[in-house]
Image (tube, rainbow, N blue to C red):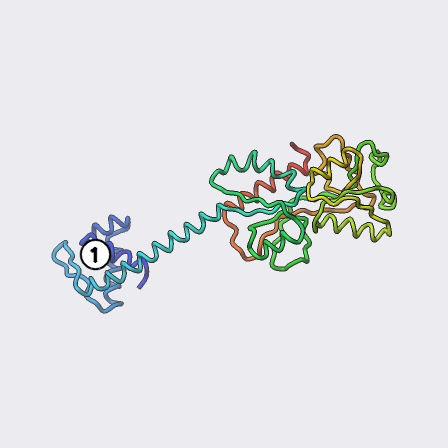
Amino acid sequence: MTLTQMRYFAAVCREKSVTRAAEKLHISQPSVTVAMQELEAETGLNLFVRQGKRIDVTPEGEFLLAKVSAILHSVEQLSNDIGELVHTKNHIRLALPLQVGSILIPLIFEEFIPRNPEIRLEIVELGGMDSLRMVEREELDLAITIYEADYCSGLQYTRLFDSECCFCTSRDNPLASRRSVEMAELAGEKFVMLQGGFFINRMVQQAFADAACPLDVVLRSAQLHTVKKLVARNLASTFLMRETVADDPQIVAVPFARPLQIRAGIVTKQQRQIYSDVRKLIGFVREKFRQVEAGQP
């Protein structure tokens, strides 16, 4: 017995007429007739007593109708529950590292949220391994990160944009006029770094270690604003993505002679359904970073 047969049977019982049932179901009358004949043959029950154009339900038919009605109700409830589940995916949990967040969060609030008021975003400023672990544990729906491809086979990575880690310093620093710098030239510099297990920090520390060059960190701060303020006042220098300081005229981003490449991407959990609202957010983020790459406002 199929769900289609059950729905046709319930409609015939309700309407007491094959013709009216077919009209309600928006199908042809012969389709309903054939379905009822097949149902009686499959069950071995006499479900109807036909009196001219009128159809009465037999006691056996009433018994079956009670069972069928319960099943159809359960199917309808399941459909509603699935709809509710999908609706809850309008709540999207997103992690952004500080540097990417400084670029993207204003755009999300200015453009994405007003255009999509039905979507509730929960944004966490978090990067590095912590955000990846939270995606893996399904505590986040997605994270934008500077991804290590070999971190976990259970995560799906989609490229967003390529950038580079730069030596960021005050425009008053003599090195600010350089087209590029070597690690060894930074031996006398004092640095302020973002606190935490960010991939950029690990990249820089490894580059200094490879160059056998000391890295003099005088402050580790959780606040990007603090880092940039100290750099702008020529009290220390730092290492950031070029785009992070593009809007600050007091800070100059000088690339390294041997570039430290950054590949930012979106990380989701593999084999987890990506709902339409999440895809909409991903599309928005991609478009904004395409504009960043192209130097568009």
Which one is in front, 22 or 285?
285
Which residue is painted at 23% across and 52% down in the image?
21
Considering the image in quadrants, where does the N terminus appear? bottom left
Residue 47 image position (x, y, % from top left) = 20, 63
Residue 152 image position (x, y, % from top left) = 64, 59
Q: Is residue 86 left or right of residue 1?
A: right
Q: Is residue 46 left or right of residue 220?
A: left
Asked which quadrant contains residue 73, the reply is: bottom left
**Residue for badge 1:** 13
The vertical placement of 18 against 192, above or below, is below
Determine the residue located farthest toward the bottom in the rendered image: 44
Q: Amino acid at mark 1?
A: Cys
Which one is in front, 117 or 187?
187
Badge 1, how many Cα within 10 Å: few under 14, some, many 20+? many
Asked which quadrant contains residue 254, the reply is: top right
Considering the image in quadrants, where does the C terminus appear? top right
Residue 178 image position (x, y, % from top left) = 84, 36
Residue 94 image position (x, y, % from top left) = 57, 46
Which residue is painted at 57% across and 44% down in the image?
123
The vertical placement of 274 against 179, above or below, is below
Which residue is painted at 61% across and 49% down in the image?
143
The vertical placement of 38 against 224, above or below, is below
Which residue is painted at 68% across and 49% down in the image?
146
Which one is in front, 199 or 235?
235
